[in-house]
Image (cartoon, rainbow, N blue to C red):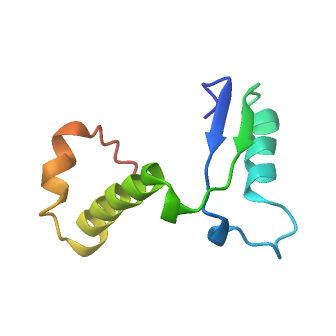
Amino acid sequence: MAGHDVVTMIPDPRSIKVRSGNSLHDYLQTELWFTEKASTNLLTHPQDSATCKGIQLADFLAGMVQAHFEDNVSRDFTTIQPRLNLNRLF
């Protein structure tokens, strides 16, 4: 995120925890500015995933990746793998 001027985060409102003292937005913005020394402006626009096809697609793809790496179910992952650039950290 630090390599971009503006980053837009689109969380599902159901995933936002209102009890926390600091929001994810505030935490990430602080990390970008002070830890990464970036001038990135973080925008947050909550949107219900039930009405957003883009969020549904991202969730669907994340599920394929999760199933491959955590459940060893790779049938769907092999379909998208040629389009992915994997960077194994551990």
Looking at the image, residue 4 lies above or below residue 73: above
16 or 20: which is nearer to us?
Answer: 16
Q: Tell which residue pokes out farthest to the front in this image.
A: 51
Q: In this view, does 42 lie to the left or right of 75?
A: right
- Seen at 79% across and 60% down, the residue is 23
Q: Which of 60 and 3 is in front in this view?
A: 60
Q: Residue shown at 77%/25% (left/top)? A: 39
Residue 28 placement (x, y as % from top left): 73, 47
Q: Position of residue 32 (x, y in %)?
A: 73, 37
Is residue 68 toward the left or the right of residue 1 in the image?
left
Q: Quadrant of residue 66?
A: bottom left
Q: In which quarter of the image is the N terminus?
A: top right
48 versus 30 height, above or below: below
Q: Quadrant of the C terminus?
A: bottom left
Quarter of the view holding residue 13: bottom right
- Name above or below for residue 25 compared with residue 42: below
Q: Is residue 73 left or right of residue 57?
A: left
Dividing the picture into quadrants, the one containing residue 15 is bottom right
Q: Is residue 77 left or right of residue 30?
A: left
Residue visible at 42% across and 58% down in the picture: 56
Q: Where residue 80 appears, x then y in whole percent?
A: 20, 47
Q: Between residues 6 and 49, which one lies in front from this camera angle?
A: 49
Q: Which residue lies furthest to the right in this view?
A: 21
How far from the left and from the top, in percent, is residue 55?
47, 54
Kindly identify the residue that appears in the image at 30 percent across and 71 percent down.
70
